[in-house]
Amino acid sequence: MRLRTLPVSTAGVITASALALAFGRFRWLPAILSLVFAVLAQIASNFANEYFDYRDGLDAPGRDGPRRGVTEGDISPRAMLLATFITLALACADGLALVSFGGWWLIPAGIVIALGALAYSAGPYPLSRHALGEVAVIFFFGIVPVNLTFYVMSSQWHFIVFLTSLAVGFMGANVLIINNFRDTDADRAVGKVTLSVLLGKRYMPPLYLANAVVASLLAIPAFLLTPAWFLIFLYFIPSLLIARAMTRLTGPRLNPLLGMTAISMLLFSLLLLLSVFL
């Protein structure tokens, strides 16, 4: 499930809930359903990534990143593929419950999200292998969950919500930047083209920091809805420290930064929620 990265999916829903609360539109049931859907969709995407990367020979035993169960022989490929589709089916079943809040158009939207969970690692043009992983994260973990969660609670779209969804997307992209930065040499050896392979490792720490700056700027309008706007800086400071650490660490020593980046993303959503309450 890659538990250390699951805050990526929860952050978008919490952010949208904070914004709905700020606009007086928050509702518990669609918020909970959206949270369950987001987490299940991310888990399904993680399962699919593990299966298809193993199938296509892109993972090797003893990798620098967290242990991969299929590659190491802990889980059979068939069991992982089955788990992928069961988890995706559970996400879709949960998503159907949101139709009563957002309308029937959520069904094709849900189909696109389900296909996106698979297209990241599978299909004729896997996004993660063509330097499009970060773009996919910005869309599916930023724009989609924040805007859709806000909509099913409020039946409205809002420009500040859209800006904040971009901020969340750039934060999520930083999780992938750390992951691909760590695996650059291994990915290059097996022909997997990530953004780090395409641009070179030296550009990843500056890109990480640039994403954090852009995310902070995009989030300012949301924080300005409250008197506690200064809390946004509590997100940026750890991001600055992580970007600096990237220049000094290599291999498995980067793994803690992966979890820290995901946690900082969750921290952002909780800071926004706290600022609304304040």
Image (spheres, rainbow, N blue to C red):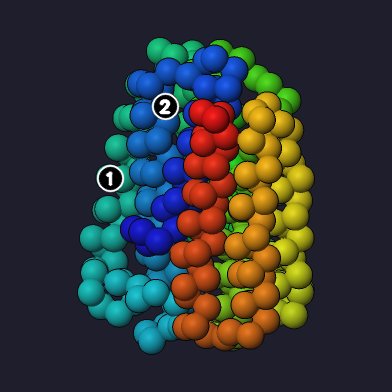
- Residue 31 is tagged as 2
Which element is circle 1 on?
Answer: helix
Residue 19 position within the rendered picture, expressed as x and y whole percent measured from the top left: 58, 27
- Mark 2 or mark 1, earlier in chain: 2
Which element is circle 2 on?
Answer: helix
Residue 145 position within the rendered picture, expressed as x and y whole percent measured from the top left: 53, 35
Q: Tell me which amino acid carries mark 2.
A: Ala
In this rendering, position of residue 227 left or right of residue 7: right
Mark 2 Cα-neighbour bin, 10 Å: few <14, some 14–19, many ≥20: many
Relative to 224, residue 114 above or below: below
In this rendering, position of residue 73 left or right of residue 60: left
Mark 2 or mark 1, which is nearer to you? 2
Visible in this render: residue 185?
A: yes
**Mark 2–mark 1 distance (CA, rounded to whole Å):** 23 Å
- The residue at the point 55 percent across, 42 percent down is 271
Q: Tell me which amino acid carries mark 1.
A: Ile
Q: In which quarter of the image is the C terminus?
A: top right
Closer-to-camera residue (172/135): 172
- The residue at the point 56 percent across, 78 percent down is 182
Closer-to-camera residue (216/66): 216
Residue 38 position within the rendered picture, expressed as x and y whole percent measured from the top left: 43, 40
Residue 9 position within the rendered picture, expressed as x and y whole percent measured from the top left: 47, 46
- Mark 1 and mark 2 in contact (Cβ < 8 Å)? no
Visible in this render: residue 162?
A: no
- The residue at the point 43 percent across, 18 percent down is 27
- The residue at the point 56 percent across, 47 percent down is 268
How many numbered marks appear?
Answer: 2
Residue pointed to by mark 1: 86
